[in-house]
Image (spheres, rainbow, N blue to C red):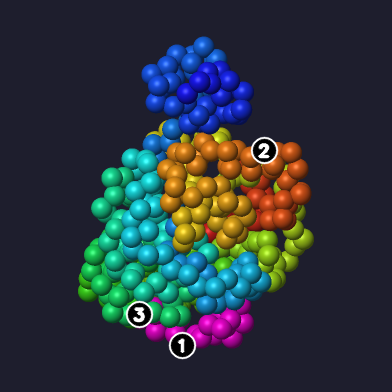
Amino acid sequence: MHFSIESKILKTSCLTDILHACDGADYLNQNRLVQSLKISPPRRATSIYNLHFDIVHGCQLRCVGCPNSTLLPKIKRISVDDFNLFLGNIDVQRVHTMRLFNYGEPLLHKQLAAIVEQIPRQKWKTSIVEISTNGQKVNWGDFEDMLKLEVVNNLVISCDGDGSPEDYERLRPPSKWEKFIEFLERARELRDRWSPATQLMTRTVISDPKVKKTWYDLLHPLGWTPEFRGWMNLPDAQEHLSGRKTQVNKEVCFFLAESAQFSENPWHGEVNLLYVDWDGTVVPCCIHPQAAKLGNLREQTYNQILNGKQRRDFISSMKADRSSLSVCGNCEIGPPGDEGPSFRSVLEMHD
């Protein structure tokens, strides 16, 4: 190459871009170059606290408080080979919690057991693997094979309302109460047989803490432990059931904060968050299925995306004028320490 390293620097805006601009002959001089330019090296993450991975894009339900109620996504499923490829590009050592969902319904995948089987084969280790489902459509044979692997630590079913069949079906169309009960019973039986260490939980969104008893009386005898939450105001949802007007935050949100901002929860010295769609697209958060595209694990490693131009430009846009962003400009989530009313609502109903 006839161009000097310094001339390439003028066309780049961060160290990650600088190093990618350098060819093989320049590589030996990269450290010297970085020192001479007094540029901070890119942050290399060695762990991820929360990893949400949609093995299925889309959901068959149209829950009124969810963005899918208006976005109406078509169902798409990741292949086993792609899933393994994308996991291989997550270049960290440890993951605290891996959830096989973000806004998709994981039990719609036709090879669930084969998907789950890829997780313990990775170079990195995860402490918790979780599946959260609406429990309305299940391939029971594949589901049983998945439990036989004893990889999933938490099995969670979502259920909202006052604990009555009528309210459940109203909030989660076209759900049927009898299918919900069938899942509670059959999943518990299979868990007991094949994976007794797997925890059975519900995530139950309620408006009134007085209805907790109704849910306890239903769930505890069936072996399930409820986790209660309040309603969030989610962008693009059909309804906001919190009973309050959305209070849009103007700051860079919790999900894009620097790991050092999570001073109260320093897991392995850092808190990194990763949200991935079925095709490897990395998105900012779990508040919306695709508030932005920050990169893709098909072509990039996690650390390249973390330090990459797409993510950096998106954060700059939030800093400059968050209100101009189609999704984030209608979202309540704020920075660590000032997360906003939707974030607090998740915690207010906890026991």
Q: Nearer the viewer, mark 3 or mark 2?
A: 2
Residue 86 sits above or below residue 158 on the image: above
Disc 3 or 2, which lies upstream in sequence?
3
Location of mark 3 (residue):
139
Report the magenta residues as a range.
161-185
Q: Position of residue 189 (x, y in %)?
A: 28, 78
Location of mark 2 (residue):
316
Residue 81 sits above or below residue 313 on the image: below
Location of mark 1 (residue):
178
Could you say which is closer to the camera, residue 152 or residue 296?
296
Whether tag 3 and tag 2 are in contact, CB under 8 A, the answer is: no
Q: Position of residue 1 (x, y in %)?
A: 47, 23
Question: Magenta stretch containing residue 170, yes or no?
Answer: yes
Marks 1/2: CA–CA distance: 48 Å
Q: Could you tell whether 259 is left or right of 140 in the image?
A: right
Q: Amino acid at mark 3?
A: Asn
Could you say which is closer to the camera, residue 126 or residue 36?
36
Is label 2 in a helix, a strand or a loop? helix
Disc 1 or 3, which lies upstream in sequence?
3
Is label 3 in a helix, a strand or a loop? loop
Q: Nearer the viewer, mark 1 or mark 3?
A: 3
Q: Is residue 161 visible?
A: no
Q: Could you tell whether 166 is left or right of 244 in the image?
A: left
Q: Quadrant of residue 130?
A: bottom left
Residue 110 sits above or below residue 277 on the image: below
| Residue at image coords 29%, 66% | 114
**Residue that extends furthest to the front in the rendered view of this protein:** 2
| Residue at image coords 33%, 71% | 111
| Residue at image coords 31%, 45% | 124
Please identify the dominant SS of the magenta region: helix
Question: Magenta stretch containing residue 107, yes or no?
Answer: no
